[in-house]
Image (spheres, rainbow, N blue to C red):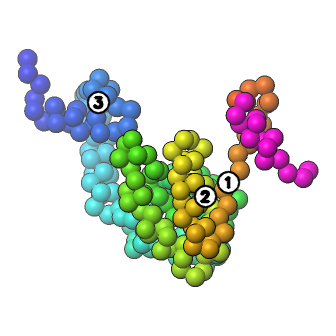
Amino acid sequence: MKTPSSLEELIEALRCLPGIGPKSAQRIAYHLLQRDHAGALRLSAGLARAVERIRHCEKCNTFTEEAVCELCRSSRRNAALLCVVETPGDLLMMEQAQCYDGMYFVLMGRLSPLDGIGPREIHLDRLLKRAQDGIVREVVLATNFTVEGEATAHYVGELLRERGLRVTRIARGLPVGGELEHVDSGTLARAVLERREA
């Protein structure tokens, strides 16, 4: 029996999601059609609405429905501090930690030459323009501690230092509540090297 073309199209569309292979896409499609028509309609409408309304903030490049996002419009933020993160999810985590009151720039990725992601794809031209606005005094690099994240932080840091900006990097260390015996040696070594006065 041949699968209906609209079902094949749905399964193929679901495969664009990260971590979703052909079998998972098929299971999701069958679930939505068999057991959750209302959920399928909500998903469809929500996705269509988001694609239509969401855009990038003109200042920080995160997702927003406005030309300039709420954080960038806030007068309570320290405009002299600019934190560079990889994704809107990273920005959200920084905000939830309530440890930073400056502004942001979201790269929407990280340098990864093997994947064809270079400076243009992560909006470095916009970052440089934002960082050199005459207000920013320090750029905090908060990219992930992966090979690509470290390479991105190094590259961005060098570009910004060449332009006379102060550049700092978030520290690595032990997680709160973590026990030494369960921490990997790289994290432990970095925590010891980056120790400070107690």
Q: Mark 2–mark 3 contact, CB under 8 Å?
A: no
| 57 within the magenta span | no
Name which residue type carries label 3. Ala
Numbered disc 2: secondary structure:
strand
Q: State the extent of the magenta-drawn residues as a range.
A: 185-198
Which quarter of the figure is the N terminus placed in? top left
Number of the front mark, 2 or 3: 2
Asked if residue 46 can be seen in this view, the reply is yes
Q: Position of residue 31 (x, y in %)?
A: 29, 28
Q: Position of residue 104 (x, y in %)?
A: 55, 65
Name which residue type carries label 1. Ile
Q: CA distance from mark 2 to mark 3?
A: 36 Å
**Residue hosting label 1:** 170
Task: Point out which mark residue 25 bears.
Answer: 3
Numbered disc 1: secondary structure:
loop
Q: Position of residue 54 (x, y in %)?
A: 35, 62
Task: Give the residue at x 38% y 32%.
Answer: 19
Near-viewer residue (84 or 156):
156
Numbered disc 3: secondary structure:
helix
Near-viewer residue (95 or 194):
194
Q: Residue furthest top?
A: 1
Q: Is residue 21 above or below residue 170?
A: above
Task: Give the residue at x 21% y 34%.
Answer: 12
**Residue hosting label 2:** 141
